Amino acid sequence: MKRRKLITTLTLSALFCTLICVGSFIRIPMPNIMPITLQTFFVLLTALVLPLKTSILAICGYILLGLIGLPVFSGGGGLGYVLMPNFGFIIGFFIATVTIGVLVQKLKNRKLWHYIIISLLGITVIYISGVLYFAFITNVYNNNNYSVVWFIQTAFLPFVPKEIVCLILSSITAFKIKLYMTRVL
């Protein structure tokens, strides 16, 4: 039985890691620095659907694949990607996955609005981490002097409509398939 659970955990982690990777290739170029991708949708879905350890394994696999050089991040891959301004969003993916996973575990009576609120919290974590890291790398490491307003206009506001759609779609999808996933696990 333990072997079956291990195989199921590894398979689901690999599947959702792959979905996150695919989400980074579905992109719409933007006039600012970062493209619009579907990574957030798949990160939210992973954290909402999978058990905590399995979702952490999936997001860590995604980050590891990117850091060893596979071009799975929206702007490529490799260890040097840590110095890219948008790497903070990748860090935010991990923090949001843990946060969402812990909160979903505590849910007893699952309702759609629970998933929506938890997803909103996850997106908030992703953007706090992402925008702060973006500002740090841009202003401190790259020695620029952009204002807080510029960072909000560049790294947050253009993505709000897409994130609202991702939040709603990932919540509905997770709500619908969660019953089936508990049977598998």
Image: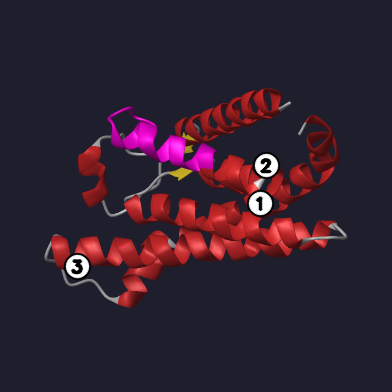
- Give the Cα separation between the discs numbered 2 and 3: 37 Å
Disc number for residue 19? none
Q: 174 left or right of 43?
A: right
Query: Is 126 or 29 nearer to us in this picture?
Result: 126
Residue found 20% across the figure and 42% down from its top? 80
Pick the quarter of the image with the N terminus: top right
Q: Which residues are magenta?
A: 57-73
Q: Which residue is mark 3?
A: 139
- Point out residue 12 in the picture as x, y percentages from the top left corner: 63, 30
* Quadrant assignment, res 164: bottom right
- Give the Cα separation between the discs numbered 3 and 1: 31 Å
Q: 73 left or right of 122?
A: left
The answer to whether marks 1 and 2 mark residues whose Cβ atoms lie closer than 8 Å is no
Determine crowd level at label 2: few under 14, some 14-19, many 20+ residues with C-alpha closer than 10 A: many
User: What secondary structure do most residues of the magenta stretch adopt?
Assistant: helix
Pick the quarter of the image with the C terminus: top right
Three-letter amino acid code at disc 1?
A: Val
Residue found 27% across the figure and 76% down from its top? 147
- Point out residue 114 in the picture as x, y percentages from the top left corner: 78, 62
* Quadrant assignment, res 65: top left
Q: Disc 2 or 3, which lies upstream in sequence?
A: 2
Query: Is 127 or 33 nearer to us in this picture?
Result: 127
Which one is in front in this view, the residue at disc 2 or the one at disc 3? Answer: 2
Is the residue 123 above or below the residue 33 in the image?
below
* Quadrant assignment, res 9: top right
